[in-house]
Image (tube, grey):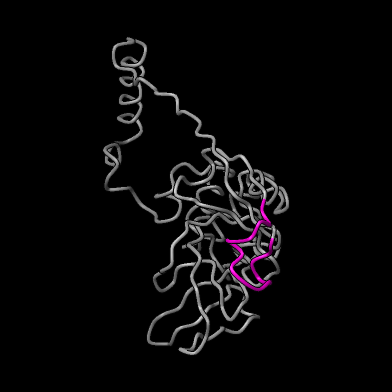
Amino acid sequence: MNTLGQIIANHRKAQKLSQGQVMEKLTELGFPIKKSGYSNWENGVTQPNAAQFLAICKILGITNIYNEFIGGHNPDDPMAELNDIGKAKVLEYIHLLMVSGEYQRTDHTAIRTVRSLKLFDMPVSAGPGNFLDSDNYQLITVGNEVPIKVDFGVRISGNSMEPQYLDKQIIWIQQTNTLSDGEIGIFLLNGNAYCKKYQNNSKGTALISLNPAYAPMPIRETDDFICFGRVLN
């Protein structure tokens, strides 16, 4: 059975798209990624997260996700046990219901929510003090593309959180002073602000970079440590 990466590569080639073209479309949808990161997906070294995966399926026109990536018939699909003739009759009946005008769904147009959020100018991988108390920010207008629970934004600095977060990328933060093991957040450790994955388990308490080139940053009882919030993108 083909791996997730092989399936993505096969569909990309069938669409006659280069890796670069898929990367451009991912960027347009709000999921920028470096060439090495995308190549790692197709080669099975890493896998896209859930949002990235759905974006790729949209770009490559993969609609039957269950059949493509799991195989066989979806047991929750009521048409799964029908042959092609039976499926055609179901679609014909659906068409008759639609043209009758009596059974069409009433769509409610989503209201665009516009609000202003603080985007802090200080890069989160450097700089002393509590940057949330500083005046180094700009107010930017955002819409429904930013989760409603977001309280502020900052820019990633450096490559320690690649491939998921790139240098200069804006990340959106829900303000909270506690995170669970495995969550990604913004932290102050001994006077410097960082975006890292929080580790708090049998392996110890530390801040972890997604880029394996960077060593974990242990958090000791004597350290000055503050959690600013949870990354929501």
Q: Is 90 covered by the magenta stretch?
A: no
Name which quarter of the figure residue 95 lies in.
top left
Task: Examine the residues drawn in magenta and state their main secondary structure.
Answer: loop
Toward the viewer: 138 or 38? Answer: 138
Name the side, left or right, on which 124 lies relative to 58: right
Name which quarter of the figure residue 92 lies in.
top left
Q: Position of residue 124 (x, y in %)?
A: 64, 66
Which residue is pictured at 67% across the width and 49% down the height? Answer: 138
Name the side, left or right, on which 210 lies relative to 88: right
Toward the viewer: 3 or 187? Answer: 187
Q: Position of residue 206 (x, y in %)?
A: 50, 82
Name the side, left or right, on which 72 lies relative to 37: left
What is the number of callouts on the image? 0
Name the side, left or right, on which 67 lies relative to 21: left
Q: Is 134 covered by the magenta stretch?
A: yes
Which residue is pictured at 27% across the width and 45% down the height? Answer: 76
Q: Residue furthest top?
A: 100
Toward the viewer: 84 or 114? Answer: 114
Q: Position of residue 111 (x, y in %)?
A: 46, 28
Above-or-below relation of 16 to 131? above
Above-or-below relation of 106 to 127? above
Toward the viewer: 86 or 175? Answer: 175
Which residue is pictured at 59% across the width and 61% down the height? Answer: 133
Which residue is pictured at 35% across the width and 26% down the height? Answer: 88
Magenta range: 122-137
Q: Position of residue 32 (x, y in %)?
A: 66, 54
